[in-house]
Image: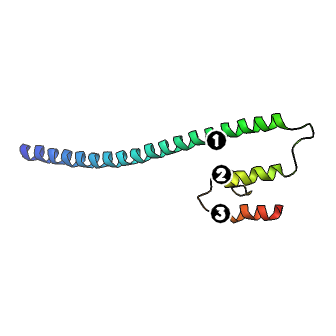
Amino acid sequence: MRNREIFDQVSDMEKQIGELYEQLGDLKGRLSELLEENHRLAVENHNLRNHLDHQKEAADETSDKKTSKGSFPGEGYDNLARLYEEGFHICNLEFGSPRRDEDCIFCLDFFEKTK
């Protein structure tokens, strides 16, 4: 009987090792997805920071050029139109979030109200 017990223990351990190997494969897949998402977000963050730095530089240049009377009428709408053309929402529902290569009816409605 002693040999049978040892054989059963080895069989149980083999089964457990198989289950652990399967769990390890699942974790490896999830880790791969997380690393890809992290890389994508890091690239997007880098691009947004560059865009923000560029916008700050442009804003600094325009503030230096402004006359003592202040900004021109409609300049804010021009900035919003530029942001929309660069691919960002300007509507109050999703302001500042990136558009997915399609027009937003709420943003377009805002333009219609300003005409």
Q: Visible in this render: residue 36?
A: yes
Q: Residue at x 67, y 38 (%)?
A: 54
Whether residues under marks 2 and 1 lie with C-beta atoms below 8 angstroms apart, the answer is yes
* Residue behind mark 1: 51
Q: Amino acid at mark 3?
A: Asp
* Residue behind mark 3: 103
Image-based side of 50 in relation to 16, left or right:
right
Which residue occupies the foreground of this view, 79 or 109? Answer: 79
Q: Amino acid at mark 2?
A: Glu
Which residue occupies the foreground of this view, 32 or 49? Answer: 49
Q: Amino acid at mark 1?
A: His
Find residue 72 and report its horizontal and vertical position in percent. Answer: 87, 47
Numbered circle sitting on residue 86: 2
Find residue 55 and report its horizontal and vertical position in percent. Answer: 70, 40
Q: How many marks?
A: 3
**Which quarter of the picture shows residue 9?**
top left
From mark 2 to mark 1, how far is it between C-alphas?
Answer: 10 Å
Q: Give the mark nearer the N terminus: 2 vs 1.
A: 1
From mark 2 to mark 3, how far is it between C-alphas?
Answer: 12 Å
Q: Give the mark nearer the N terminus: 3 vs 1.
A: 1
Image-based side of 32 in relation to 11, left or right:
right
From mark 3 to mark 1, how far is it between C-alphas?
Answer: 21 Å
Whether residues under marks 3 and 1 lie with C-beta atoms below 8 angstroms apart, the answer is no
